[in-house]
Image (cartoon, grey):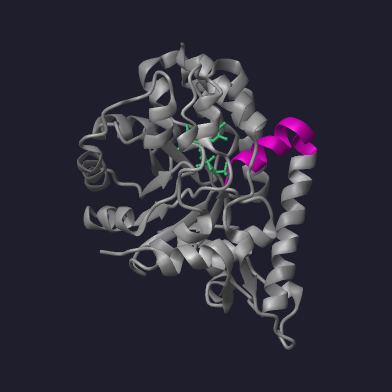
Amino acid sequence: MSRSKRKLDHIEYALKTGQSRSSGLDDLKFIHQSFPNIGVDDVVLNTKIDNLDAGSPIYINAMTGGGGKATEGINRQLAQVANIFNIPMAVGSQMSAIRDKQEQPSYKVVRQYHPRGIVFANVGSEATVEQARFCVDMLEANALQIHMNVIQELVMPEGDRDFKGALKRIEAIVHHLDVPVIVKEVGFGMSRETVISLQDIGVKIVDIGGFGGTNFSLVENERRDRQMAFFDQWGIPTSVSIAEANSVSNEMTLLASGGIQNAYDIAKAIALGANAVGMAGQVLRWLQEDGMDATIQHIDDMLLDLKMIMTALGSKDIKSLKNVPLVITGKTKEWLTERRID
Ligand code: FNR
């Protein structure tokens, strides 16, 4: 199976398996306030990701590159969208561009169409310091994402089977790169223990990449003859994972993703502690099924909806949205109260 074919499979099967809407964010409710005492025009959406200033609290999360012209086209359109809204955008794993120079244009197109915006490079936790630096330089990236995807690799027929040494490699990258490093999951969530391990090696930004949206066990099972169904429900829902990560420290910048589909999801993820919120599968679906103009309209509507929600809550900025009262019910409550911490 070629790498390039795998990239195209991922897009096809991510769209086919879809978003399960089991991120746990539906378990949260805001507490209505009758006197918000602000107007919609008072609301500002800018936020900070470590030392980077982002115009809005959303970013397009890592998806593609390395699948020839098809993925170059998708990355170009995503970059155009990111540029219009001045939002950060991550590219998909650049390991294929390290191995095959011909694949570099499918990533470089992002910097070309988002020339002054925030761009995140992306590698797996198998990357060396040199490889990580090469990927950042390729895009003049403002930050580097390192993805952790053990379950995806295990279900992937041609995936890795040995996960030793990942923390050591991440630690080396964090200490030798001069751009911020974001460690991310890909839809299985991060536990409190995982976040503590990352904090201990000097990681300052995590994207918890929770369960409940794109499901890479389902995606990879589509590519297998003998299914590993037990991994299809594996993972920490996004709501729970944000709360777990947030309980570790307020020194870390917390990013949230996994099943984010609309402004209500975004507002809840921020209220639970996230500084910014990543979207992958939903944006891909908009782009592939509704087209470029509709995608721009969907994002415009979503950001206006977010301002409406923040107005109702009396939150004039992201910092104050992070502090509004919330009620946590259902499975999320059960998980947070029943989970054992040793
Ligand atoms: C991804 N994702 C991903 N993540 C990563 O770090 N490197 C990668 O190369 C990819 N590739 C990729 C391809 C496709 C088609 C999709 C849909 C997703 C994972 C992505 O960044 C995100 O963590 C998960 O998809 C969960 O978020 P959503 O999709 O539920 O918003």
**Which residues lie in the magenta part?**
279-293
Instruction: Please identify the residue farthest to the top as the structure is shown.
Output: 1
Compared to 30, does 171 lie above or below? Answer: above
Compared to 32, does 251 lie above or below? Answer: above
**What is the chief secondary structure element of the magenta stretch?**
helix
The reply to whether residue 46 is visible in this rendering is no
x then y, percent, for residue 205:
38, 55
The reply to whether residue 319 is visible in this rendering is yes
Quarter of the picture containing the C terminus is bottom left
x then y, percent, for residue 131:
30, 29
Quadrant of res 129: top left
* Residue occupying image coordinates x 71% and y 67%: 307
Residues 60 and 267: in front is: 267
Query: How many dots with numbers?
Result: 0
* Residue occupying image coordinates x 40% and y 62%: 244
x then y, percent, for residue 258:
54, 48
Query: Is 65 colored magenta in this rendering?
Result: no
Compared to 249, does 209 lie above or below? Answer: above
Horizontal arrangement in the rendering, residue 93 relative to residue 161 (left or right): right
Query: Is 292 colored magenta in this rendering?
Result: yes
Quadrant of res 281: top right
x then y, percent, for residue 341:
30, 64
* Residue occupying image coordinates x 46% and y 37%: 231
